[in-house]
């Protein structure tokens, strides 16, 4: 029950790969070539001595890095779902809503290949999350 043509499939795959690449590069820049662990250690050391003043710039940087890390996870998960077309029970099929199993339209997937829910379920989910 695949609703994507081979062409659409390829298009989404390349969009995801591109996104993955972009996030990867941006994260590397944010961390200045350090690993995440190094980065954390560095922040700890800097905050160690005299009355640690919170630097808004560093916090913003950390927030961006965290967001990119989450996005990176989403994108790679979507790529894994996309490639595993024989996904068995337990793992979500790419392009199908996680909640109601509806097919997510290609137009939406084109813009947000990592979408896990159809529009209806997504907004219900967001409403629930906010409550
Ligand atoms: Zn749904």
Image (cartoon, rainbow, N blue to C red):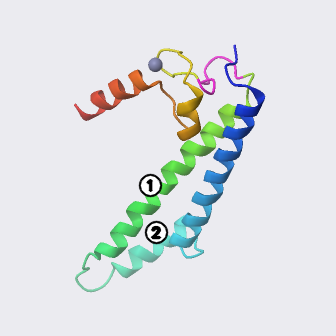
Residue 26 x/y as whole percent = 56, 65
Foreground residue, 42 or 107? 107
Q: Does the magenta stretch include residue 91?
A: yes
Q: Quadrant of residue 75?
A: top right
Foreground residue, 25 or 47? 25
- From the image, tell me which residue sits under label 1: 67
Q: Residue visible at 34% across and 68% down?
A: 59
| Residue 40 circle label | 2
Residue 100 x/y as whole percent = 48, 14
Point out the image quarter for the C terminus.
top left
Q: Residue visible at 40% across and 28% down?
A: 122
Question: Is the CB of mark 1 within 8 Å of ligand 1?
Answer: no
Foreground residue, 115 or 5? 5
Q: Does the magenta stretch include residue 104?
A: no
Residue 27 vs 50, above or below: the answer is above
Which of the two marks, 1 or 2, is nearer to us in this view? 1
| Residue 111 circle label | none
Tell me whether circle 1 and circle 2 mark residues in contact (CB < 8 Å).
no
Residue 36 vs 43, above or below: the answer is above
Please give the range of residues in magenta.
Answer: 87-95
- Mark 1: few, some, or many residues within 10 Å (few <14, many ≥20)? some
Residue that lies at the very extreme toward the right in this rendered image = 6
C-alpha gap between disc 1 and disc 2: 16 Å
Residue 106 x/y as whole percent = 59, 29
């Amino acid at each position: 029950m695949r609703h994507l043509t081979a062409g659409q499939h390829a298009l989404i795959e390349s969009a995801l790969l591109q996104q993955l690449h972009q996030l990867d590069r941006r994260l590397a820049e944010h961390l200045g070539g350090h690993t995440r662990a190094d980065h954390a250690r560095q922040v700890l050391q800097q905050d160690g001595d005299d009355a640690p003043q919170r630097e808004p710039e560093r916090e913003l940087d950390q927030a961006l890095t965290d967001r990119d890390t989450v996005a990176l996870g989403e994108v790679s998960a979507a790529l894994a779902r996309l490639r595993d077309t024989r996904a068995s029970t337990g793992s979500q099929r790419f392009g199908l809503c996680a909640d109601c199993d509806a097919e997510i339209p290609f137009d939406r997937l084109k813009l947000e290949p990592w979408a896990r829910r159809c529009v209806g379920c997504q907004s219900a989910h967001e409403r629930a999350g906010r409550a």
